[in-house]
Amino acid sequence: MIPLRDANPVRRTPIITIATIVACVVAFAYTQGVEASQGIEGVDKLFETWGVVPAHLVAAWKAGDYVSQETLTVFTSMFLHVNLIHLAGNMIYLWIFGNNIEDKLGRLWFIGFYFGGGVAAVVAQILIDPTSEVPMIGASGAISAVLGAYLVLFPGARILSLVFLGFFYQLIEVRAVFVLGFWFALQLVDGIASLGLAGAEGGVAFFAHIGGFVAGAAIGLLVRGTLAGRGRLSGLPRAGVG
């Protein structure tokens, strides 16, 4: 099931979502330039320098070095992608779901939410594999937080999705609760299956997806509760003057 677009209009232009997509595309173009000039070795060095290497980050934090390049990589890693498929997949999800979350939270709050979701994703993956020396890169952890918030805030939104039925496919509208619930279930299954596998290192960071999604859903519940509280207050009768 691949989401293509949602029927959930926004009130204003999603400037931060667009800017994030542009930044990721620019970073990918830079990566391609490095590969053209320095080969795959140059790209590997780029990812090792600006991607999150769990073992290095844990060592830095254990040493009390919280303000360092290793900490900075938690944020720079969110703009790096391995290949065009990796980039395109992430950006499609960000565009479909990010604009509504930005619209709901407001632009400044969305910036904090997005990076906070990315941090939660990194922490979740490090808790699972703190000794890994394979760089973690990609926006999927932060985008997972967007998906979690969307599920909570817009569960009934209709998502036009490409659904595969064996050798056939069909375009159908599916409610967000089923699309994103199915996506999260896959992450859980694949994440649990990857535990303890010798060949899992260097693959998809499933627990980053899980951690980001849970963090986003938690913030979504907080936002929904806050908005519901304001709605109840606004519905109270005003005191009259006798």
Image (cartoon, rainbow, N blue to C red):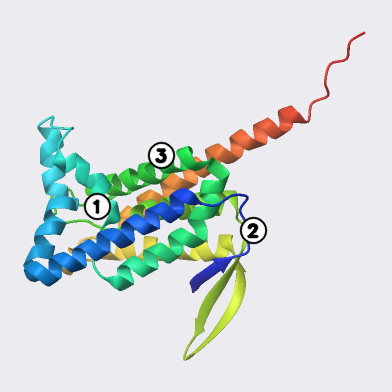
Quadrant showing the C terminus: top right
Residue at the right extreme, as displayed:
242
Tell me, for residue 112, which label it has, or none: 3
Q: Which badge, 2 or 3, is on the more N-terminal residue?
A: 3
For mark 2, give the secondary structure: loop
For mark 1, give the secondary structure: helix
Label 3 crowd bin: few (<14), some (14–19), many (20+), radius 10 Å: few
Q: Residue at x 32, y 58 (%)?
A: 24
For mark 3, give the secondary structure: helix
Label 1 crowd bin: few (<14), some (14–19), many (20+), radius 10 Å: many
How far is disc 1 from disc 2 in space, using C-alphas? 32 Å
Residue 76 x %, y %: 24, 49
Residue 152 visible in the displayed image: yes
> Label 1 amino acid?
Ser
Q: Write down the residue under mark 1.
A: 77
Q: Is residue 190 left or right of residue 68?
A: right
Q: Is residue 221 above or below residue 29?
A: above
Q: Write down the residue under mark 2.
A: 156
- Mark 1 touching mark 2, by CB under 8 A? no
Tell me, for residue 164, which label it has, or none: none
Residue at the top extreme, as displayed:
242
Q: Which badge, 1 or 2, is on the more N-terminal residue?
A: 1
Residue 75 x %, y %: 27, 46
Residue closer to the observer: 176 or 142: 142
